Image (cartoon, rainbow, N blue to C red):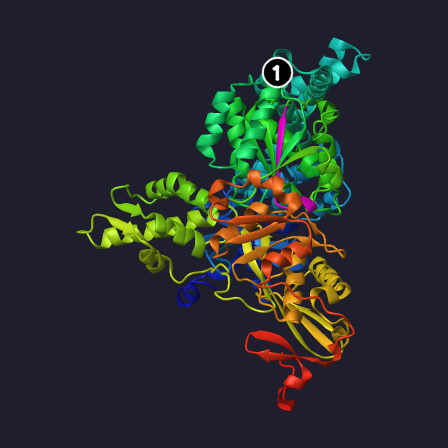
Amino acid sequence: MPNVDQEKINESNQIALPMLPMRDIVVFPHMTAPFFIGRSLSIASLEKALEGDRQIFVVAQEDPLIEDPEAKDLFHVGTIGKVLQIMRLHNGTIKALFEAKTRGRLIEAHIDEPHFAAIVEPIPEEDSDTPELHALSKNVRAEFKHYLKDIKRRTEGIEKLAIDSEEPHILADRIAPLLNMDLQKKQALLENNDPKKRLEIVYGRMLEEKEFKKVERKLKERVQGQIGRTQKEYYLNEQVKAIQKELGQGEDGKAEMDEYAKKIEEIELSVEAREMAERELHKLKMMPSMSSEANVVRNYIDWLLSMPWSIKTEDNFNLEKAEKILDARHYGLEEVKERIVEHLAVAKQVGKIKGPIICLLGPPGVGKTSLARSVAEALGRKFSHVSLGGVRDEAEIRGHRRTYIGAMPGKIIQSLRKVKHKNPLLLFDEIDKMSYGTMGDPAAALLEVLDPEQNHTFMDHYLEVEFDISDVLFFCTANVQQNIPPALKDRMEVISLSGYTELEKEHIAREHLIPKQINENGLTSKQIQFQHKAIFNIIRNYTREAGVRNLEREIAKTCRKVATQLVKKTNLKKVVVTPNRVQKFLGAQLYRHSKAEEQNEIGTTCGLAWTQAGGELLKTEVNIMKGTGKLQMTGKLGDVMKESAQAALSYVRNNANRLGIYSSIFENTDIHIHVPSGAVPKDGPSAGVTIATSLVSAFTSIHVKSDVAMTGEITLRGKVLTIGGLKEKLLAAKRSTITTVMIPHNNKKHLSEVPDEILNGLEIIPVTSIEEVLEVALSELPSPVTESETEDSQIIETKGPEVSILPQKEVPEAARTYDA
């Protein structure tokens, strides 16, 4: 028992008990009642009582709406009783059966952990046995019989329970819970310890209810006389009005109904929506205003009348303004901005925006959401954002049916109500991250929403009336195109946003991110200055991303460090952020980009890879060893990349003699292909030419040029096929010491999309076959051989990083080893 002075209790008639604060319930002695306990401290009090003699003190709260009551929120008189039994329900609550014994006065309450507790003084019953009291008890019993028959209309068990109560004070306490009294009156009755006064209050309340019943009958007869028997519907309505008038509740309800009726007349609803609103309003008029069903109908009417049935914003098709807004908010992304402006130009010609749904596809942080917001600003439309990441319930899109408790419309209707216009720009964010669950497929629900031929009759399950959403301009964002359901992707025009180049990131940081973080961290441009090399140092060594989110975090961290120095050193006026200070502020470098080898090597070739964070240099290593012709591939390669390696090996074996390799050597040689950074998953077909070049180099002992990189898919006939991510791959080559890059000839047309700052200093060589690749990549071309020569005399000798093939007669016995 928390904070209870046991010595003080033992000296008086007071007892320390667990306590249950009750909301809107007054418990009288000599009654047995079930309670539902949900608050954690209340459950702890119940369990504390069960550990002992099961005694507990029950007291009512003055305000039932208070979730966590304090001592001042409790009445001073309650009931001491015993917990008879409990039942634990599946939702975590407890149903307890409580037998009240006697009144108790609350001396001290403890509203803290681990449970509610109280110091209580039992209140003994006053001993008053007079003829007047017995006569009053007899009248109360007689009146109670009539009360049960006329008012309650249920007598089984209750009448016997009350009549068997011979003691006057017990009789009053057993009748009191059955009377219609508010919380304050019941509490006053509980606090009254005089049996005679309690019986008088109970007797008077029964007579009041009896008179109220008579008034009700008179009202019923008067209403029936006014309207006749045939007008049942009107009669029921008038009866409700008459009752409300007698209780003084009629004016507020009438005003609410009149307001609803006025809104229905003023708002330009559709025909179907107007009929539904009038029907629901008529239903609401027939219901008690405080019933739960009335609240459901009232909420529905509120939703129906708050929808923007005819409110629109005028589209602004000023292309110059649109271009200005897009350029101011987004650096680079020229192709994307150009396509958006084209859509606006077509819309200006047609007069309205009708066309495919635009899906902005790209890695995180490249500005997809902000780009959609800029389009909305350029058009002068409202903007609303709906996040679909993790959504797996169809009702999130279409809404819940009103039969469910807590039903509400779907996200589309909610967004339209929020912006108060029926033609906003609505962005479905992370559309590729929806999932299919037991509650349905939200992607299937979006098929109707994103179909211009169907969405003019979109029906939300909650509203149950058609709402035209064809004027809404839908934008979607996604990170991975493969995760978008095909039927949904077919309804959208996908616009790809590739990652930013380092130069673009530097410009964004200098023009947008740094000024923003300087302002947010309470600095000024006179107090901090970033050198260009420092910005590039942060971009290259502390972030690896396609967008600029982590870059902004690192800049913010640097600004905080500078702010700390300025506060600590009052004489310091300005801090220039240099590359050395970047390392001091941000710690050791987090990332290191791959670099080309300083000298030519055998069996090692530089490839180019695309990642969501940009391009990377991807080296491919090949070792050959004496064995049984086994092929081993390591480096966490995906299935597609393994198949590409198989294709490259098949080409080399099929053209072995022409490439200067004896075909019989493959039977006695194990081949190990490894792609470094073994913990990083790798996949894709574009490493085919890289693997083929490394294989030829390893078998012919010809060095591969270290300043040459390549990318392309290889076929069994040695053809070089198209690849993707050309811009990112060339950026990776530019960042390294690569001077020559070989790309598939079919990718030559994509060079126009690559910025000049990337192409400058790089020699781009389009190739169509692996022969053209070998001519550029190898330090010398291999000489063709024939099987008639002494190919069986070749062995492999490993000398450090170099591998050479030598005739057997020139090698001593001790050198005939195969070092992996």
Q: Disc 1 marks which amino acid?
A: Gln
Q: Tell me where the magenta segment starts and ends, as one range.
A: 472-482
- Above-or-below relation of 731 to 691: above
Residue appearing at x 73%, y 46% in the figure: 436
At which x and y percent is residue 683?
A: 66, 57
Q: Outermost residue toward the right? A: 230
In the picture, the quarter occupied by the C terminus is bottom right
Q: Is residue 292 visible?
A: yes
Q: Secondary structure at mark 1?
A: helix
Write down the residue under mark 1.
349
Q: Outermost residue toward the left? A: 571
- Above-or-below relation of 335 to 455: below
- Above-or-below relation of 175 to 210: below
In which quarter of the view is residue 414 placed? top right
- Above-or-below relation of 224 to 378: above
Is residue 36 left or right of 734 when viewed as pictured?
right
Task: Out of 774 and 761, give the one closest to the viewer.
Answer: 774
Task: Out of 812 and 558, give the one closest to the viewer.
Answer: 812
Task: Out of 753 and 781, give the one closest to the viewer.
Answer: 781
At which x and y percent is residue 299?
A: 63, 28
Q: Is residue 351 visible?
A: no
Residue appearing at x 25%, y 42% in the figure: 526
Q: Outermost residue toward the bottom? A: 813
At which x and y percent is residue 806?
A: 65, 79
At which x and y percent is residue 296?
A: 67, 30
Residue appearing at x 59%, y 57% in the figure: 776
- Is residue 336 covered in magenta? no
